[in-house]
Image: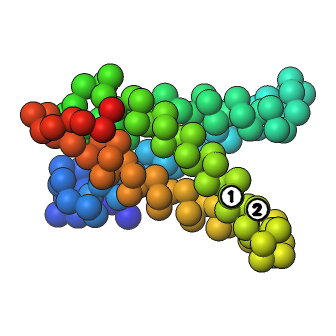
Amino acid sequence: MIGGDGPLARLTLTGDGIAGKAVRFGVVGVLSGAIYVAVAGTLVHLDLCGPTMAGIIGYVAAIPVNFIGNRRFSFRSETNLASDLPRYVLLHIANSLLAAATMALTIDGLRLHYQVGLVATIVVIPVTSFIAMNLWVFGRRRGTADTAT
């Protein structure tokens, strides 16, 4: 557990190394997940829409917190918003396709239970997201060539 002002807490909160980024990414992910669950769960509980639509609304509701949290806290991007945002959007489109492909491979290709697909997806998406955000979405520093727009 990270707490206090010990070396691990300082490294996590101030370090630019991969471990610090990964922990901060996890914190943002938990916060985004909590928003998703709160919004989707509330919509379903209040019978305002079905679970599928509630899940979509919950996901969309968590996107701003996820983007800002990862941009400013996890990866500390120094590039401008107009540079980071399109890459972030493209990553989430790719994540949606990857999640669907992971489920299809697990269920249709490997003939496994859908719950295995769910577990595979919640492992694959964060790992690929972290790598993509670290290297591509938020990985450049101000003053470096920004040719991948």
- Identify the image's colour scheme: rainbow, by chain, secondary structure or one colour: rainbow
**Quick check: 123 left or right of 104?**
left
Tag 1 and tag 2, C-beta contact below 8 Å: yes
Q: Which residue is nearer to you in this view: 13 or 91?
A: 91
> The N terminus lies in which quarter of the figure?
bottom left
Using the rendered view, name the quadrant where residue 118 is placed. Answer: bottom right
Pointer 1 residue: 101
**Label 1 residue SS:** helix
Q: Return the mark for residue 24.
A: none
Q: Residues within 10 Å of mark 1 (few under 14, many from 20)?
A: some
x and y percentages locating residue 135 in the rendered image: 30, 52
The image quadrant of residue 104 is bottom right
> 146 above or below 129?
above
- Amino acid type, residue under disc 1 in the picture: Ala
Q: Please state which amino acid type lies under the numbered disc 2.
A: Ala
Q: Quadrant of the C terminus?
A: top left
Residue 90 in the image: state x and y as whole percent. Answer: 49, 37
Q: CA distance from mark 1 to mark 2?
A: 5 Å
Q: Residue at point 39% right, 29% down? A: 85
Residue 104: give its label: 2
Q: Residue at x 20, y 59 (%)?
A: 17
Q: Residue at x 46, y 52 (%)?
A: 129
> Which x, y percent locates residue 114?
81, 66
- Element under label 2? helix
